[in-house]
Image: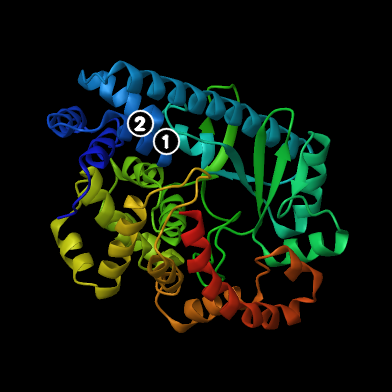
């Protein structure tokens, strides 16, 4: 049994699938004990689920004190406005890509919200996530520039050599539109690790989603979408409940055991098992007993589940960073190699750690020299981090 705070229990009840007939009873049950309403609002923002919490509490007839209610209403309205703005941008970017002959699939964001929840009004989304081929990355970037976006790398790096090295080492790049206050993430791969979900991409089965803003966009079909969401969420140890809410809603009317096996076959490894366990335990997902028994028998899945719980309950500082203890950061780094069984995934995790430029000055050296820069400075950074955390506290 997972021991959550009273406030997090209430939030977990609110982010159950909207079609779950037990959702309102779960909310009322969680709200029947004395809880800190201000903390509920804080955690709703921390997990980016303000819309679900506001709607769930209202539907269940649970009233917050006036101050907390105002905070939640303000936060939920801001999140909804941001999501609606993002939905409009997804349509605008999708139409521009189509006009330029660029094949694209939209993942997460408002498209995912409509796909799994049936509405864009509740899910918090601040960016446009779109997948294109690496061959069309430059053309897609040109389209984004024409739309008013600017490539944003590590605080605004614009040196052509550093930009080229960054794009070669990363699966995604962030583009910002200052006037519209929107962000587009241009993906060329769906996973940082080359051994994970290798067959999911532009060639995968697709579905079309109609957004309320008037456009239709392509996204992944159920099986590859589930595999991607599981790997993405597990790679972040499910630190935001909004990711788990998407998975639970997607699985609501599906054959869970079949989808689990299909996602594993697509290269998602242990991550579908972690997602199903967490969705069952936190969000009340009905999963087949034999599957749950099998998943709980996997020692590594149990460990990843434990690490995920630690990330879910971790506090957040004023800058939005998770305030994890140093040992939990080490656990996070170790977990990346366990998401998918096999030496290929583990080897790719190590290679990514050694070859990916994490800091701006790494981009100033050739890629072959990056491991030396990282390993040379790693001991100093490891020794200095506890001191920095102590000073910040």
Instruction: Between residue 378 and residue 371, name the one nearer to us.
Output: 378
x then y, percent, for residue 352: 59, 73
Residue appearing at x 19%, y 27% in the figure: 24
In which quadrant of the rendered image does the C terminus lie?
Answer: bottom left
Position of residue 15 in the picture relative to residue 127 (left or right): left
Q: Which residue is mark 2?
A: 41
Q: Quadrant of residue 258?
A: bottom left
Label 2 Cα neighbours within 10 Å, binned few <14 / some 14-19 / many ≥20 = many
Query: Could you tell me residue 268's position as x and y percent?
Result: 42, 64
Q: Nearer the viewer, residue 221 or 10?
A: 10
Residue occupying image coordinates x 35% and y 30%: 52
Numbered tag placed on residue 71 in the rendering: none
Q: Which residue is mark 1?
A: 45
Q: Are marks 1 and 2 in contact (CB under 8 Å)?
A: yes
Q: Is residue 126 above or below residue 142?
A: above
Give x and y (percent) for residue 30. 17, 34
Residue 223 visible in the displayed image: yes
Rate crowding at label 1 as few (under 14), some (14 to 19) or many (20 or more) other CA atoms within 10 Å. many
Q: Residue at x 12, y 32 (%)?
A: 33
The vertical placement of 41 against 128, above or below, is above
SS of the residue under disc 1: helix
Helix, strand or loop under label 2: helix
Q: Is residue 339 visible?
A: no
| Image-based side of 295 in relation to 161, left or right | left
Q: In 3D space, how far apart are the residues under numbered discs 1 and 2 (Cα atoms)?
A: 6 Å
In this view, 327 is above or below 182 = below
């Amino acid at each position: 049994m997972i021991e959550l705070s009273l406030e997090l229990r209430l939030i977990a009840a609110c982010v159950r699938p909207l079609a779950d007939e037990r959702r309102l009873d779960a909310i009322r049950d969680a709200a029947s004990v004395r809880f800190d309403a201000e903390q509920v609002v804080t955690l709703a923002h921390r997990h980016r689920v303000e819309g679900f919490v506001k709607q769930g509490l209202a539907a269940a007839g649970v009233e917050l004190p006036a101050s907390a209610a105002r905070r939640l209403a303000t936060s939920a309205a801001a999140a909804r406005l941001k999501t609606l703005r993002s939905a409009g941008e997804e349509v605008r970017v999708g139409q521009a890509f189509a006009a330029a002959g660029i094949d694209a699939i939209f993942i997460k964001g408002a498209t995912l919200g409509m796909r799994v929840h049936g509405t864009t009004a509740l899910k918090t989304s601040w960016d446009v996530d779109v997948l294109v081929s690496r061959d069309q990355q430059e053309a897609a970037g040109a389209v984004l520039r024409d739309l008013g976006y600017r490539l944003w790398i590590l605080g605004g790096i614009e040196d052509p050599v550093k930009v080229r090295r960054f794009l070669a080492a990363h699966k995604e790049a962030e583009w910002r539109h200052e006037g519209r206050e929107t962000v587009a993430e241009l993906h060329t791969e769906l996973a940082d690790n080359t051994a994970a979900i290798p067959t999911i991409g532009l060639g995968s089965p697709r579905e079309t989603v109609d957004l309320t803003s008037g456009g239709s966009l392509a996204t992944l079909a159920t099986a590859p979408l589930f595999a991607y969401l599981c790997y993405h969420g597990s790679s972040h140890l499910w630190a935001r409940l909004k990711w788990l809410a998407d998975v639970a809603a997607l699985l609501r009317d599906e054959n869970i055991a079949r989808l689990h096996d299909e996602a594993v076959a697509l290269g998602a490894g242990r991550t579908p098992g972690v997602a199903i366990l967490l969705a069952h335990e936190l969000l009340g997902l009905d999963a087949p007993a034999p599957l749950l028994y099998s998943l709980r028998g996997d020692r590594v899945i149990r460990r990843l589940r434990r690490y995920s719980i630690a990330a879910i309950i971790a506090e957040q500082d004023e800058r939005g960073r998770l305030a994890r203890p140093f040992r939990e950061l080490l656990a996070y780094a170790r977990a990346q190699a366990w998401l998918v069984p096999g030496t290929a995934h583990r080897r790719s995790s190590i290679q990514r750690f050694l070859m990916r430029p994490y800091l701006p000055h790494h981009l100033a050296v050739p890629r072959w020299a990056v491991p030396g820069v990282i390993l040379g400075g790693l001991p100093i950074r490891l020794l200095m981090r506890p001191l920095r955390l102590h000073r910040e506290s």
